Each structure stands twice: as C-alpha cells, then as structure tokens.
Amino acid sequence: MSLQIPFDNSYAALPARFFTRVSPDPVAAPELVAFNSDLAAELRIGAASASVMAEIFAGNKMPDGAAPLAQVYAGHQFGGFSPQLGDGRAVLLGEVVDRGGNRRDIQLKGSGRTPYSRRGDGRAWLGPVLREYVLSEAMHCLGIPTTRALAAVLTGEAVYREEALPGAVLTRVAGSHIRVGTFQYFAARQDIEALEALFTYARDRHYPQAETPLDFLRAVIERQVKLVVQWLSIGFIHGVMNTDNTSISGETIDYGPAAFLDIYHPVTVYSSIDHHGRYAYDNQANAIAWNMAQLATSLVPLMPDSDVAIKAFTETVHAMSGMIRTEWISAFGRKIGLESATDEDEALIGELLTSMADNQADFTNTFRALIHGDARDQFTDPTAFDAWATQWRQRLQRETDPEALMRSVNPAFIPRNHRVEQMIQSARAGDYAPFERLLKVLSRPYEDQPGAEDLTRPPLSTEVVQQTFCGT
C-alpha cells in the first residue's frame, strides 16, 4: 500500500532562483524508528506499512505529488554575513493543507547532499534526529510554536563525524521554512523582483492582513517577541539564533544545540559553537531584536521612499525592547501566580530570579514547587527564599486562583539535557524504550505523573551536560 500525502505545493511555483530541484539521495536499508500518527492525521496523511513509510521518509521513494527541492537563503551566522547558505542537508518534499486549513511544509532533514551542502555530506546521525524529534514534540506539548516531527528513519548506513555513527533522517513539519535569511539572500543581490515575489508570497501565506512591508515587519516582530519570551519562560536556550534559523512564521526551528536550563543562571550557554555567549539564555531577547533589524534592512528596497522606510523600520525595531519587557512581565507574572502582572511586579519577579541564580536553584523545579509550597528546598540557602516568599504571599492575596494558574504554565516535565543524552546512548545500542518513554511523558508536561518522578530530577554531577552540538 502506498502512502497517500495530499500535496498542494506553492513554493515550487515561485521563480527558479528561489530553490534547486533535487531529490534525496537513496539509502541502503531504511528502517522506521518513529512515526507521529497524531500529526499524520492532522495533515490528512493516510496509513501505510512501516516498510513503505521507511522508504518514503528515508527519501528512497517519492510519494505522488511531491515536488522535492532545496531552498536557498543567506544568513548572519554569529554576526558574520554569508551571502549564500541554503538547505545543505534537507529537501522540501512539498506542502499540505491540514485539517485546520493551515498550509504546512513537509521536509526531510539529513537526506543527502544538495547544491548548498558546501563541504558537508548532507547527512545526519541518529542522535540529533532523535534529539530534534523529542525537543520539538515537547515544545509543541508545552504550547510553544514549533516545527514538529513526523517520522524518524534509520538509513542502514554510517555517518562519519569523529567516529562512525548510525545514519538517520528526520521528517519535520513547519508552517513554512521561509527565514529572515531568505529575504537577506535576495536583498543582498539587489534582486528586487525576487524580493517582491518573496514578500508577496510570505505575506499571503502567513500575514494576509499585512498590506505593506512595514505591516509585515510589525506582524513578524509581534510573533517573534511572543515566541522568545515563551522560550525564556520555560528555560529554553535555542543556541544558534542566526538569521537563517529565524523563521518568518514565528515558529521555533532548527533544533541544533538547543537545551533547557537545569540550575538557573542568566548567562548560561550550552552550544559548543557559541564561544562568546551571543545566544546565551538572557541574550536571546537582544538577539531576536538584532535579527528583526536585519529583516527590516532587507525590506527597505520594497518601500517607495528609503529614508522614510528606514526611519519607520528603525522605530519599529527599537520598540521591541518595550514589547519584550511587557510580555516578559506578563509571562513570568503568571509563573508566580499573578494573572495580570504589571510593571510594579517586575521587581518581585526579578528578586526571585536573582535569588535562584545565587542559590543554584533548578529553574523548572523551583517554579513548579511554588504550587506545592516546597520551593525553598530548591535553594542552597532556604532563608533566601523565605525572605522573598513573604512579599510574594502578600501579593497573592489579590489573586483569585494562583495555584491553578501556576499549574497551567509551570511544567513538571521538560526534556532535560541529561535524559536526552541518555536516550540517545540507549538508542545507539538499539534500545528505544527511553525515547518512547520521554515522548509519552513529555506529551503531558503540565500534569503530575506518578511513576515518572525520576524525569523531574536534575542531573547528578556526573550527568551534567556541559555542551550541546549541532550534529552536522
């Protein structure tokens, strides 16, 4: 039985310079590791045998209606501009319109070389594939906009990095794979015709209410502000917020060295390639504003008066700091039980975070423990929490149901870095039970789950993950 995917492709109808038509490289012995049947139902994808799905999601066979291509884009990588990047190890199979009427991309990641691979082999190994599968699905269940994982397939071939590793391909789903870097690519070439076509396409697909490039910029910024504050509120660190990894749709995309805080400290960095902390936990708000400035610069050529455009775009980007602060106070206010936190509550929130950093408190467990009344146990000096808690309890008297609010925004379970690494090592040995267990528990992150308490435990000193890697 063949796999029925109701493709309705639109990006492939754009001018040829937007992409290169390319098919995935076949693999030796594809084996289906995971398939997201709930997501498949959303996408109106029919059923098929595991062997058929393995062939398709490895790239060995193209389903009817696919229009495989690799997208081209540019990007600032840690501040340095690369005028041409592109999908170096990914192939967009096509798009579907899901049951909710939303257009979504289906892309294979790790499917072989493309014209944009440069010196890479275009492949991925099993570790990063399972890592992105778990993290992206966890983010979705946490209620945060994200790409999602549809399937993971072993290739039956080795991928060579520092050692021979089992090869794999991830099938991921996104609102689109249009990036800030896509706009930068055409702006850098002064290809106004293509830039206009891209703007029209992206606007119609994601922000149909936006009539002008300025409206479009404001709409993108609004989503990015909400997204990054959501990251901060759960202790998520993207790790590589380059402009080519910033999606126009406002989704979390390109899980490479992404990680979650254990012990809270604002300057935490996990990414092995972020040598100077450009994308540290507390610098992500600055990073997204910088990225939006690059989008604004790319949109200037579409405006009739560049001087007027630069002034308006500059004001719009500069306004982001106030937007982020307002959103942050609201998000972290909810985390401590305040339904409608105001500027007056900012100091209370800040004092808690400072005390957490000073006392090596676990980020996730501290906020969750506020519900149960045992948060002081998270502090090396519990009296530091006691001093703050007196003010906090007084403030809670003005709230109606702070416990229910905190329970709805403070997860009990996140994909802790050491558990993800343990899952990967087990999978390398052929044991997928930890992977499947993580997926199951993380599908209900805001619920207390008896029997899963071990997944809330911070790492022991021997389990701490010091660095995370892109896996390219």
Image: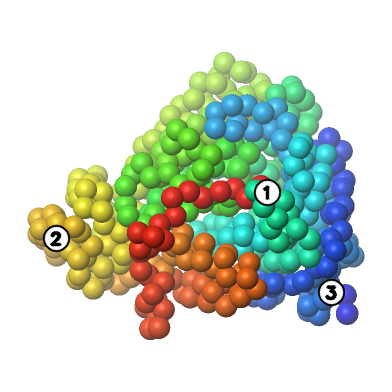
Dot 1: element: loop
Q: Is residue 406 left or right of residue 94?
A: left
- The local crowd at label 2, few if under 14, some if 14 to 19, many if 20 or more residues have their Cα within 10 Å, is few
Dot 2: element: helix
Task: Pick whichever, 46 or 120, lies toward us.
Answer: 120
Q: Are marks 3 and 1 in contact (CB under 8 Å)?
A: no
Is residue 214 positioned above or below 188 on the image? below
The numbered mark, 3 or 1, whose residue comes first in the sequence reads 3
Visible residue check, residue 78? yes
Query: Residue 161 has which mark?
Result: 1
Q: Is residue 122 left or right of residue 395?
A: right
Most distant residue in the front direction: 163
Between disc 2 and disc 1, the foreground one is: 1
What percent of the width, then of the height, locates residue 261? 39, 54
Q: Quadrant of residue 378?
A: bottom left
Please tell me which residue is depicted at 37% across the width and 70% down the height of the picture.
456
Which amino acid is tagged 1? Answer: Arg
Is residue 126 positioned above or below 248 on the image? below
Please tell me which residue is depicted at 77% across the width and 36% down the height of the picture.
118
Dot 3: element: helix
- The local crowd at label 1, few if under 14, some if 14 to 19, many if 20 or more residues have their Cα within 10 Å, is few
State how far apart marks 3 and 1 are (Cα): 29 Å
Please tell me which residue is depicted at 54% across the width and 68% down the height of the picture.
423
Q: Are marks 2 and 3 in contact (CB under 8 Å)?
A: no
The numbered mark, 2 or 1, whose residue comes first in the sequence reads 1
* Residue for badge 2: 382
* Residue for badge 3: 52
The numbered mark, 2 or 3, whose residue comes first in the sequence reads 3
